[in-house]
Image (spheres, rainbow, N blue to C red):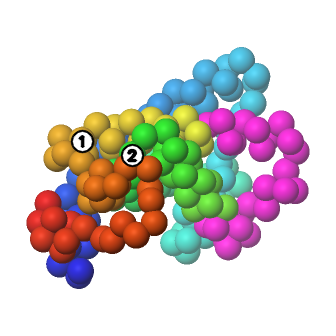
Amino acid sequence: MRGYACGMMKRALWPGLLAGAAGVVAMTLGEKAEQRLTGRPSSYVPARTLERLTGMSERPKPPRAVNWAMHYGQGALLGVVRSVMAQAGLRGPVASAQFTVVRLTNDQILENATGVGAPPRTWPRAELLVDLVHKAVYGFATGAVADALAARSGPGPGQRHAAQRPGRKTGAGPLPRHEAYGH
């Protein structure tokens, strides 16, 4: 299994970085359009989180480059998770919705662990809704790119397993090792 997991990660790395970068560009374009309409200011939470994670000196208004580094870097890196999902056969809108939860969870872990953020249940509802919409744009855009890139390799092991006995019936054993790992 170790060899297969390592191989899947290698296949998922560059497509995942590309998918995550595409997702963060889509999210950022949506954020900028929303900010023009609503007048909401840019958030420096990504920069403050990166400052705390790395031990950088903290400033009242962090440099834009630090903000972009965390914003784009985190989005690109998390795209690898979505790419692994797609390589395994977890594709489509349901997988993108699941991945959106991963993105939201990652943000909350980092922001709350560093003391930069607060649990979403404490946020004003309008602010929470804006964050959910933007992260969903990221999750679905990242998913569309990751799925398209993974589809070039054919169905993933999970998809091949599901095709053995459509309808997810009991008693469907795993794919033979050579069929799962040989892909």
Q: Residue at x 86, y 42 (%)?
A: 125
> Which residue is the extreme one toward the bottom?
2
Q: Residue at x 25, y 67 (%)?
A: 175
Image x and y of residue 167, in percent: 44, 50
Q: Are marks 1 and 2 in contact (CB under 8 Å)?
A: yes
Residue under label 2: 91
Q: CA distance from mark 1 to mark 2?
A: 9 Å
Q: Is residue 165 magenta?
A: no
Is residue 54 depicted above or below 183 in this figure?
Answer: below
Using the image as rendered, state which of residue 137 and residue 25 is in the foreground: 137
Query: Callout 2: helix, strand or loop?
Result: loop
> SS for tag 1?
helix
- Please name the residue shown 78% across and 44% down the image: 128
Locate residue 78: give its quadrant.
bottom left
Left or right of residue 119: residue 94: left
**Label 2 neighbourhood size at 10 Å, few (<14), some (14-19), many (20+)?**
many
Horizontal side of 110 relative to 120 (left or right) equals left
Instruction: Name the mark on residue 90.
Output: none
Q: Amino acid at mark 1?
A: Ala
Picture quadrant where residue 112 is located: bottom right
Whether residue 167 is visible: yes
Which of the labelled discs sits on residue 151, or is there none? Answer: 1
The amino acid on which the numbered mark 2 sits, given as a three-letter code, is Arg
- What span is colored magenta in the figure? 109-134
> Which percent across, then down, holds residue 137?
55, 35
* On-image quarter of the C terminus: bottom left
Dominant secondary structure of the residues highlighted in magenta in the image: helix
